[in-house]
Image (cartoon, rainbow, N blue to C red):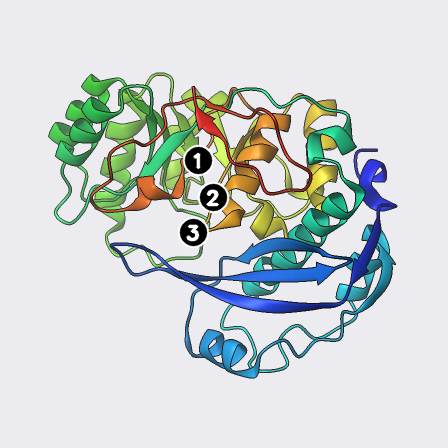
Amino acid sequence: MIWDRIATLPLVIDGYALERLDAAGYDRTTTQFRLSGAGEEGVGEDVGLFDEGGEALHAAGPYLELRGDWTLASFCAHLATVDQWQVAPPEWEMARSWRNWAFESAALDLALRQAGVSLPEALGLEPRPVRFVNSLGLGDPPSAALIADRFTQHPTVGFKLDAAASWDEAIVADLAALGCVATVDFKGRYGLEVEDEAALIAMYRVVLSAFGAALFEDPHELPEVEALLDPVRDRLSLDAPIHRAADISTPTINVKPSRIGGLQPLFEIYEHCAAHDVVMYGGGMGELGVGRGQIELLAALFHPDSPNDVAPSAFNEPEIPDGLPASPLVFADLEPGFRPTPRGG
């Protein structure tokens, strides 16, 4: 098993620190956890929203007892026994997975650095160039102009678009004509209220017939939608429901490590998909720091050719800067640890 290749890595932890990250140009804040030990440091990122609980977390400082000599597996087991939310309970239960992933990814980074090996070396896998897409909404009111402008700037980069009931035939036709839409995300599995069901169904009718090669992610579980999905069932994907291998029921899934929340269940999902011919692509959750490079490297190891929603974080800015990498991302000359810096292909 993949997990067994790293589970026994020795891990020495002397302490940890917190680091607040703020996005440039838009409202987004995350927290990096920095584990230290044996002269090395390992870093992971908590993608949770920086609400009052986040402020309290930073005000309290590092209050968990994590010091000791561990293996990676025994440390992950220890994390499951401690209350990572003593300061303030999470607003959403999913935040527990986000924080646990931050600790476990930091522990993996630290264990690899202490061992002097990179993650690909430890797993016996070769990273390959990673195809990535840019995930965006079309604004309110929606317009295809932003996508057209970005595609002109970065013609190697496709898009994962958040669909909305306000999309009409003209907007969808404009998007389809660009030929750069890799995934349409309906956001139908988050339990969000449907305000105008008739408009939503009308949007599905237009979208499902317009994009002949795109993946359709998280469609709504409505009878009227189900009736429209039969011709495209081979291109359906699930995102929000995927937490463990047992949750997989579509031919394609979006793998989000921070939502899965742990190293062992993540690698079990990779193995399940390989054994059952399930196509994977990676998904991000607004990472601002080390977390984005980590999911890019995982994509390079397990699903490099898919439309991975792991574009470098600067692609999430309202006005993207010059000098951003092209797709695919390439990993070469990796240093020890789980903290890569890719370059554009």
Answer whether labels 2 and 1 touch (C-beta < 8 Å): yes
At x 47%, y 44%, the residue is 284
* Residue 261 located left or right of residue 207: right
* Residue 306 located left or right of residue 126: left
Q: CA distance from mark 2 to mark 1?
A: 6 Å
Residue highlighted by disc 2: 284
Who is closer to the viewer here, 219 or 345?
345
Using the image, tell me which numbered label, if any, was put on residue 19: none
Residue 268 seen in this snapshot: yes
Q: CA distance from mark 1 to mark 3?
A: 14 Å
Residue highlighted by disc 3: 288
Residue 61 locus on image (x, y percent): 58, 78
Q: CA distance from mark 2 to mark 3?
A: 10 Å
Placement of 259 over or under 36, stated as above or below: above
Using the image, tell me which numbered label, if any, was put on residue 309: 1
Mark 2 or 3, closer to the camera: 3
Residue 240 seen in this snapshot: no
* Residue 219 located left or right of residue 318: right
Say which amino acid is labelled 1. Answer: Asp
Tell me which numbered mark, 1 or 3, is placed earlier along the sequence: 3
Answer whether labels 1 and 3 touch (C-beta < 8 Å): no
Who is closer to the viewer here, 286 or 291?
291
At x 66%, y 79%, the residue is 63
Q: Secondary structure at mark 3?
A: loop
